[in-house]
Structures are given as C-alpha cells and as structure tokens.
Image (spheres, rainbow, N blue to C red):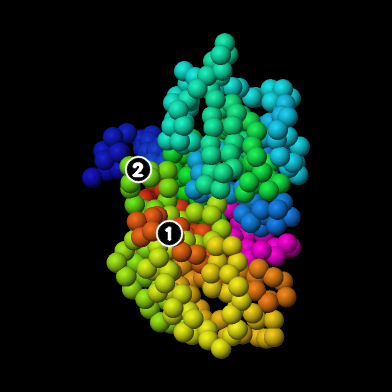
Amino acid sequence: MRRHDYCGGGSRSWEERTHHLLLSDEWRVRSFQSAAAPPPEVLLPVIAGEKLHTLNYVVSIELGSQKTTLIVDTGSDLTWVQCRPCNFCYNQRDPLFDPSSSATYRPVPCSGAACGALQLAAGNQRSCTAGQGACRYAVTYGDGSYTRGELAKERISLGGAAAAVEGFVFGCGRSNRGLFGGAAGLMGLGRSELSLVRQSVPQFHGLFSYCLPAGDFDSAGSLVLGGDPTAAYRNSSPVAFTPLLSDPHQSPFYLVNFTGAAVGGVRLQFNAVKVLVDSGTVITRLVPSIYAAVREEFLRQFSGYPAAPPFSILDTCFDLSGHDEVAVPKMKLEFEGGAAAAVDVSGIFYFAKRDASQVCLALASLSHEDQLGIIGNYQQKNLRVVYDTEGGRLGFAEEICAYG
C-alpha cells in the first residue's frame, strides 16, 4: 500500500492531523493527572500558647488585612475573633479586629444559609438584632467561657494570597477570657459546614494535619492544610489510619474507636469505646474503668517514688525532686484498624511544680462510664495527626515537631 493511499492524502496533512490528535491525548492525560493529584499544601507554624497564658496551641493568619492569632481547635466549628467596638472584651496580644477598616467585611443576614447552619456549628438557634437583620451567634464552652456577636464574611489568608478563602464566614464579637488566654480568638477545625475545613474544601479537599511541639517557647510545630494524607512530612513512622465514626448527635466531632493501650510494653485491651480526638482539650479523659486499668499498670511499673498530693483534675502525683533521672514507662493509645498514638514522654507527666516536687500522670478520669472520652493535645505532642475528612479516616504517625 502506498503511503498516500493509507493516509488519505499528502504526508504533510497527516502529520498535522496526528500532531493535533496527540496534543489532545496529552491534554486528556494531564486532566486525569490533575484530578488525581493531591490538593495544594499550605503550612502554618503552630506554637504552644504559654506566652498567651493558654495551654492550647496557636497559629497566625490574616483576617481581612489584619494579622491575628487563633487557637487551633478541632473540637469547635465556628472561627471567631474579638471585634471593635468592644467594652467587655478580654485583653489580647493582637489589636481587636476592626470591621469598619475592612472593605471586604460583610455581615451575614438572618436569611443567609450560613446563619441557618449555626444550629449545628454553634449549638444555638439563629437570632436577629431588631431592625438590622444581622445574624447573631452565641457559643458557650465546657469551662464556662463564651463568645457572642455577629456572624460575618471576610477574606481569610492562610499563609499568603495563594491560600486565601474569600467570603469566609466567622464570628465577630466579644468573649470572656476562659481557656483563650491572650489569643485573639479561635480557629474552628470541626466537621460542620461553618468550620474552616468545610469552607476551604475547594482549596484543600477537606484534608489537614498538625504536629504539636512539646511546649518549648523557641520551637514550632505545623498545621498543614491540603497535601497528600499518606505522604511523610517529617514523620519517622508511616501514617496509620483509623475510621472516623458517624454520630448524628455528635456530628461536628472527630470520633474514633479506642480499643486498647500499652504501658511499658504491657498491652491493656478492652471493649472498643468511642472517643473524641480534640486539639482544644488539654488533658486526655478516659472512662473510669479504662483510666483505672491504665493507672494501675503505670503505678505497678513506676514504683518506689514518693507520692505527692493530687493537683486539680490529676489524682496520681509524685515527688521527683530528689531524682535527677527517672525511668518513665512508654505509653501508646490504640485505635480500630491498627492505628496507634505513641505518647511522647512530655505527654506522660504534667509538672505542677517546676522543682519536680509535684509531678502528675497527665491523664484524668471521667465521672461515668457512659461519658465521651477525649484524647487531648497533651498526649498528641510530637505526633503527625492527619484528618482526611473526605476519606472518613484519621491517622497518626510519630514526628519530632520542634523545628526551631
């Protein structure tokens, strides 16, 4: 067969046609790769909040054109800041946010969908200011602290213009100090529609992770939005996942099945219980039967040290002031599917007194067996904790978070 018979014409026209066909094929392949690629990744430094008089962890972002410091809280949904004018705000390090100085600030009306989402995100019905139609919010936290104000939309920048969320819904109001210390407000990373995680799905696909430093003033961990949930950041062990649970009565929370614990290599197994993984709670709370088993095994291995009085919610304390070194049993928390969180040594003891005369096991018991357990941030230090909300899973990996 002659070439021009096969090609249906001159060789030049065939070359042109195949060139365009192959380009179309390349564009198709690129579209597949783009769809399969992990979302873009943004990293925010996370630091311990001691300087702001809080035991939580904080990040800095830009709201409108103003830099502000927020507590990282996976147990809350609504992000909020204190706003001018304010006669009853607590003292914070950053200036109060001033809506009048921002060209992109817009109050959310009561008729808006965001106002309707308040019931799930903030636990309260929407309400309107007489004659204004502005959506009002009120959130009360477990320790009695609260925030109240107006729901609004603003541009939030998470590490530069490339990581901005336009029309971000947040709370602009006033608060009492409570657990917030001197932070300007709170970043809600929960699961409802008003959380930062849900509002930034187009950018980050519902993926985020963090690594909390051990508390050194000069060290920082990281909050990573987007990226590949299975890829190593600086973790020294692979990310192991456990399924996220669905509960219509506790839908904003990150719930998983807690299946066991290990103390000094001794495994303690029990019937799976539901627990909340929360960056905004400090000390891990366990149901009485599990706490008693962990405490008993710890005391069996950590014997021979004088007891010290209980401190606040911590009932197992020691006087270690006469010891330069102590052998602390390792601890691991285990979850459904084989995931485990290795508790860093800095997360096992809480130093109530700096001279080590009152050092307490940093776990606490709940009052009743039917209460919800909580894995707090004190036991999450030096771990990469990965929240894959679209994939319905939560992962743990070991990582040293003090980057300096």
Q: Which residue is mark 2?
A: 249
Residue lying at 57% horizontally and 11% vertically, measured from the top left: 131
Task: Say above or below: 328 vs 201.
Answer: below
Per the image, label 2 sits on a secondary structure element best described as: loop
Q: Is residue 222 magenta?
A: yes
Task: Say above or below: 215 vs 321.
Answer: above
Q: Nearer the viewer, mark 1 or mark 2?
A: 1
Lower sequence index among marks 1 and 2: 2
Q: Which residues are magenta?
A: 211-227
- The disc labelled 1 sits on which kind of residue? Ser
Towards the viewer: 10 or 173: 173
> How crowded is the residue under tag 2: few (<14 C-alpha within 10 Å), some, or many (20+)?
few
Mark pair 1, 2: CA separation: 21 Å
- What is the quadrant of the N terminus in the image? top left
Q: Which percent across, then down, holds residue 269?
A: 33, 73
Residue lying at 33% horizontally and 46% vertically, measured from the top left: 247
Residue 113 shows up from this direction = yes
Task: Say above or below: 132 vs 217.
Answer: above
Q: Which percent across, then down, holds residue 187?
A: 58, 43
Q: Which percent across, then down, holds residue 134?
A: 56, 19
Which residue is farthest front? 309
- The disc labelled 2 sits on which kind of residue? His
Residue 39 shows up from this direction = no
Residue lying at 56% horizontally and 48% vertically, measured from the top left: 143
Taking the image as shown, residue 119 lies to the left or right of residue 92, namely left
Per the image, label 1 sits on a secondary structure element best described as: loop
Towards the viewer: 200 or 95: 95
Is disc 1 in contact with disc 2, using a CB cutoff of under 8 Å? no
Which residue is farthest bottom? 304
Q: Which residue is mark 1?
A: 367
Q: Is residue 191 magenta?
A: no
